[in-house]
Amino acid sequence: RKEVEQDPGPFNVPEGATVAFNCTYSNSASQSFFWYRQDCRKEPKLLMSVYSSGNEDGRFTAQLNRASQYISLLIRDSKLSDSATYLCVVNGFNKFYFGSGTKLNVKP
Amino acid sequence: EAGVTQFPSHSVIEKGQTVTLRCDPISGHDNLYWYRRVMGKEIKFLLHFVKESKQDESGMPNNRFLAERTGGTYSTLKVQPAELEDSGVYFCASSWDRATGELFFGEGSRLTVL
């Protein structure tokens, strides 16, 4: 079983749509959680950390459910520039585990 | 401030040859990681240095891969001899905190083994 599982997509949405990505992780002792964004042929970059209480950064909202070992990312009012692959990243035992990524295509 | 830099950005070699990838982390980051992404797969952990020491090398595929970080500064990852399945993008990342800190990635070294 993979440490981190994500729906690979692609998610094809129109501009202005709201889209949600989910991610599950297998290690219940995982300590910290992140969403990274990776543009085509570029390196991953941190989008936001995910806190137990949930957190929001502009149009982006991240939530963590430790009981279900589940992380989500909600993007509101999608922009063309949001098109990318979104990676769910989990840190357990000082090791970062990556999901395979969910591809988002925002269309005009 | 300079980010994580990797060299070369792209390397094309023949099966059986040797390639050495280099990573310069962000200055002051004790933690340095190597990851690999094979086409269509998730980014996979290779190993983790804390300063010059190998903290965890459980992700190294086999003994054809050798990583070093002399003096706790830059790191090299050597593949010798290279096989076809070694093709992929090798990412280096550094962080100041191995448990909770953000990973800063280099742009990756794309390796193609023919």
Image (cartoon, coloured by chain):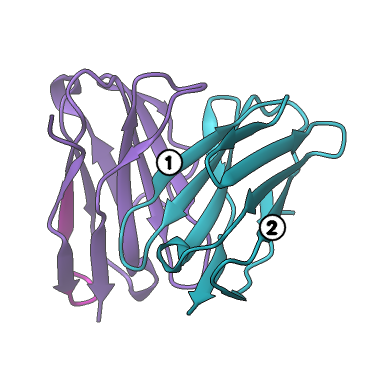
- Position in image of residue B46 (x %, y %): 42, 45
The amino acid on which the numbered mark 1 sits, given as a three-letter code, is: Leu
- Give the residue drawn at x 51%, y 22%: B100
> Magenta stretch: residue B17 in it?
yes
Residue A50, compared with residue B84, is above or below; it is above
- Position in image of residue A45 (x %, y %): 38, 46
Is B66 left, or right, of A86 in this rendering? left
- Position in image of residue B90 (x %, y %): 31, 55
Residue for badge 2: A20
Using the image as rendered, state which of residue A3 and residue A37 is in the foreground: A37
Outermost right residue: A67
- Give the residue drawn at x 65%, y 51%: A74
Q: Colour of chain A?
A: cyan
The amino acid on which the numbered mark 2 sits, given as a three-letter code, is: Ala
Residue for badge 1: A46
Q: Residues within 10 Å of mark 1 (few under 14, many from 20)?
A: some
Bounds of the magenta segment: B13-22
Pointer 1 chain: A
Is A18 left, or right, of B97 in this rendering? right
Q: Colour of chain B?
A: purple
- Give the residue drawn at x 46%, y 43%: A47
Mark 1 vs mark 2: in front: 2
Q: Disc 1 or 2, which lies upstream in sequence?
A: 2
Residue B72, compared with residue A61, is above or below; it is above
- Position in image of residue B21 (x %, y %): 18, 51
Q: Quadrant of residue B10?
A: bottom left
Tag 2 secondary structure: strand
Marker disc for residue B36: none
Image quarter in which the C terminus of chain B is found: bottom left
